Image (cartoon, rainbow, N blue to C red):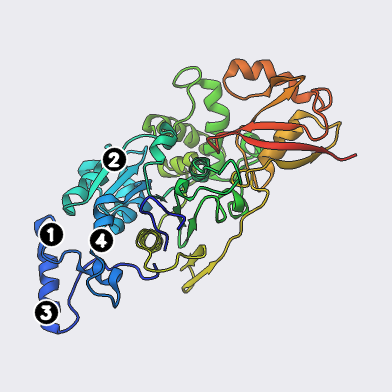
Amino acid sequence: NHLSRSRNVSLTRFPLALSIPQDNTEGSMAAATVCINHAEQGPADWNDRWKHVLNIIEGENEGTGKPTLEFLQSTCRVLVIGAGGLGCELLKSLALSGFGNIDVIDMDTIDLSNLNRQFLFRQADIGRPKAEVAAEFINKRIPGCKVVPHYCKIQDFGESFYREFHLVVLGLDSVLARRWMNGMLVSLLVYDPNDGSLKQESVVPFVDGGTEGFQGNARVVVPGMTACIECTMYLYPPQVTFPLCTIAHQPRLPEHCVEYAKVLLWPQEKPFGDGVGVDGDNPQHIQWLFAKAETRAAEFNISGVTYRLTQGVVKNIVPAVASTNAAIAAACAGEVFKMATSIGGSMQNYMQLNVGEGIYCNSVEMFRDEECPACSQKPRMVHFRRTDTLQAVIDYLVSESTLQMKSPGITAMVESQSKTLYMSQPKIIEQRTRCNLERTLTDLGLTDGHQLVVADVTTPRSLLFNIIYDE
């Protein structure tokens, strides 16, 4: 079993949230009344509280499920990334499925606009960290469930922290964060030095969910064994951008006005000091951009610039629908439950949901990319001409649909010494290496088959590429 350390991967039926007897109407009504009363009065706890979970674990083998339930409640540790629309649903579903030890990471605070779908929050919670409020709500509502909040970035933790968990669930709204988490969990893999086989006790599986409007998807990833996020980067189209000439001279949309304020005015006017970048979670930054965008819109008779639109453009916010979040979170929680209890097979391995026009749901198996830069354990071959410049390599790493890097930095061994060819941060190194961008690859001492070490914010570890020259 590739989930040792008491981990199992498998289940096909999602656990019910409430236990209501089915043998007679009177009993069902009585149980329903108990549930409603507890929901109104406070913490939900009563005899046979987890009977519904036992029924699913045991199936026809009555009396055999208690060890598994005890594992869920006492031993199994689950990490939820994100406490927003999807994260709230995940925390609720996992807690009601019997998981007793849950950690949650989220770096955001609660905004008024969150309250229409993120049901663990109330108006009095506005301005507080999402992770902390969500944990307080679940801990109070479901006795025996311990949710530990972490109000920080996922990058604030290292390998030792992520190794502590049996399973990870992603409820993120950022492709960048997904890729970073994918890279982190792949980096935990340990291979036998003798035969190169994967040590299964090092595997931490994860379930990823995502929604956009009436569309959503869920997927199961077992690092080193199934397709990872980087294997299927083509599923994530590059972020929409607007031509700079349009933004600067011929704006036609309210989004153009916001981008004008963000891309052109912010670095010129430096409203919050030199070197301070735009923070989409800072109300003062959004308010400043909103005011500038409104002025720009008025000049060109463009309507539709609002505070909410400004924040949406800056943070690349996609529309959220509560029912889509609930459906995808249920699918993700079901997969986590299956893997933790082994009562059925895991989804193979990517599910799509579309309820925009009718209802469409489909699952398909995604296969590993043998040249995946994250999980293939071998350098990726990239083809260039000897006369190509280092800038061409940077452009390739950014624009290639299977890579989509943000600000790659490149180092290589040249004349038996490690040499930084280009690094965008810190600023002093960027200034020193900028001249290399216009130099050809041969001028930089890179030969056919030369290995490049590339670092980027999309992954916590460096990736390897081998240059192959096309004559």
Chain-order first, disc 4 or disc 3: 3
Mark 4–mark 2 distance (CA, rounded to whole Å): 27 Å
- Graded by Cα atoms within 10 Å as few (under 14), some (14 to 19) or many (20 or more), the crowding at tag 4 reads few
Mark 2–mark 1 distance (CA, rounded to whole Å): 23 Å
Mark 4–mark 1 distance (CA, rounded to whole Å): 20 Å
Front one among 218 and 326? 218
- Graded by Cα atoms within 10 Å as few (under 14), some (14 to 19) or many (20 or more), the crowding at tag 1 reads some
- Look at the numbered discs 4 and 3 and tell me whether their residues touch, using CB distance below 8 Å: no
Tag 2 secondary structure: strand
Residue 160 percent coordinates (x, y): 41, 35
Residue 75 percent coordinates (x, y): 28, 50
Tag shown at residue 27: 3
Tag shown at residue 410: none
Dot 2 amino acid type: Pro
Mark 3–mark 2 distance (CA, rounded to whole Å): 38 Å
Tag 3 secondary structure: helix
Residue 172 percent coordinates (x, y): 43, 48
Which residue is labeled 1 in the image? 45
Q: Compared to 356, does 181 lie above or below?
A: above
Tag shown at residue 149: 2
At 69% across and 44% down in the image, what residue appears?
400
- Look at the numbered discs 4 and 1 and tell me whether their residues touch, using CB distance below 8 Å: no
Front one among 161 and 319? 161
Mark 4–mark 3 distance (CA, rounded to whole Å): 28 Å
Q: Nearer the viewer, mark 4 or mark 2?
A: 4
Front one among 305 and 216? 216
At 60% across and 33% down in the image, what residue appears?
462
